[in-house]
């Protein structure tokens, strides 16, 4: 048997001195689609060693002439979908509040529907302007602005991890029209009717929250997390959850009276005061907003019929 055999040729010598040669390519060639074969003649008989060597050399020559596949660059695997999945695993995303994470997932899901398989480095401002216009027409101005803003945050993250060059964020400085502010105005009669409807539906804590929000001008999360010790202090002294800004303002007499009634209600219903350090999510109650019903003797102010119907529908929606 020759000392040097062609690559991938396995003679497989048998006990009787014959050969059952086989050409067996390596893993790389198999990945390219080349399969091994037993080296036999047209009649199905095993080739002799010399004929097997000639056949193996022919197969190797075919491999040498076959075009080699171009290596896939790392950047070509960096799609927008891969970027979003990477962002979800990052500390940047995990440190966001749960409600913010939920909102980001919804908005990025809309973006991925269209850009999922697009390379991150291929997204340009004209693409994002066209996307903004599409959302504006299909889902509204506020949705277009909100989704684009979240995409901008993710593209900034792409720059930080090297998936895009610095200062190339395609979602920034699009110069799109600013959506109008969404402002809901309640008349004093509607405020009174809402509180009355809450008290009349055994949901007095909603009335507490409405009045506390109105007289404190704080966000919902801050309203629901206010500690009961503020009642004794007679002032709003807190650090806002979102901005960490300090607030120090006296309570109005109307608010102070309502909160004192809320504390009395809680004690009448067997609720023990909670610690001032308790922090509750926006969907739950806090130390002041207890969720207990008002006592039967609590006064219920009358309100115009339109405001009363409006407030009752609001309370019904909350209960659902």
Image (tube, rainbow, N blue to C red):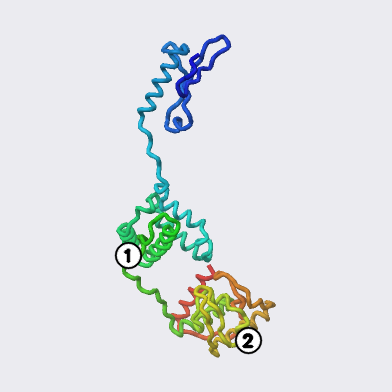
Tag on residue 174?
Answer: 1
Q: Nearer the viewer, residue 240 or 297?
A: 240
Can residue 120 be spotted in the picture? Answer: yes
Marks 2,1: beta carbons within 8 A? no
Residue drawn 32% across the image and 65% down it: 174
Mark 2 is surrounded, within 10 Å at the Cα level, by few (under 14), some (14 to 19) or many (20 or more) other residues, namely few
- Nearest the eye: 306 or 185: 185
Q: Residue at x 38, y 57 (%)?
A: 165
Up-down relation of residue 179 to residue 256 (above or below)? above
- The residue under label 2 is 232
State the residue at coordinates (48%, 80%).
308
Secondary structure beneath dot 1 equals loop
Residue 197 x/y as whole percent: 53, 79
Kind of element beneath mark 2: helix
Q: Earlier in the sequence, mark 2 or mark 1?
A: 1
Which label belongs to residue 113?
none
Per the model, the C-alpha gap separating discs 2 and 1 is 50 Å
In the rendered image, residue 201, in percent from the top left (x then y), is placed at 56, 76
**Residue 104 vertical position relative to residue 277 in the rendered view, above or below:** above
The reply to whether residue 195 is in sight is no
In the rendered image, the residue lying farthest to the top is: 16
Q: In which quarter of the image is residue 137?
A: bottom left
Counting from the top left corner in percent of width and height, residue 220 is at 51, 75
């Amino acid at each position: 048997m020759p000392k040097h055999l062609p690559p991938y040729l396995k003679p497989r010598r048998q006990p009787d001195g014959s050969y059952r040669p086989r050409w067996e390519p390596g893993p790389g060639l198999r990945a390219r689609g080349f399969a091994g074969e037993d080296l036999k003649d047209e009649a199905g008989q095993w080739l002799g060693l010399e004929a097997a060597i000639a056949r193996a050399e022919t197969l190797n020559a075919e491999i040498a002439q076959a075009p080699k596949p171009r290596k896939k660059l790392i950047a070509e695997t960096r799609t927008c979908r891969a970027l979003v999945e990477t962002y979800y695993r990052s500390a940047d995303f995990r440190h966001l509040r749960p409600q913010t994470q939920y909102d980001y997932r919804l908005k990025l899901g809309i973006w991925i529907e269209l850009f999922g398989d697009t390379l991150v480095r291929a997204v340009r401002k004209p693409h994002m302007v066209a996307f903004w216009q599409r959302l504006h027409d299909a889902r509204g101005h506020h949705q277009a602005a909100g989704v684009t803003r979240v995409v901008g945050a993710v593209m900034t993250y792409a720059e930080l991890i090297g998936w895009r060059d610095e200062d190339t964020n395609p979602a920034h400085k699009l110069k799109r029209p600013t959506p109008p502010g969404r402002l809901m105005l309640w008349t004093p009669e509607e405020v009174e009717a809402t509180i009355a409807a809450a008290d009349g539906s055994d949901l007095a804590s909603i009335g507490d929250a409405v009045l506390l929000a109105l007289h404190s001008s704080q966000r919902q999360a801050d309203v629901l997390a206010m500690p009961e010790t503020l009642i004794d202090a007679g002032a709003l002294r807190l650090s806002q959850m979102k901005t960490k800004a300090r607030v120090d303002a006296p309570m109005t007499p109307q608010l102070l009276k309502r909160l004192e009634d809320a504390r009395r209600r809680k004690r009448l219903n067997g609720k023990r005061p909670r610690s001032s350090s308790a922090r509750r999510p926006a969907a739950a109650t806090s130390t002041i907003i207890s969720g207990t019903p008002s006592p039967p003797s609590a006064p219920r102010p009358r309100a115009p019929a339109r405001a009363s119907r409006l407030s009752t529908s609001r309370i019904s929606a909350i209960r659902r």
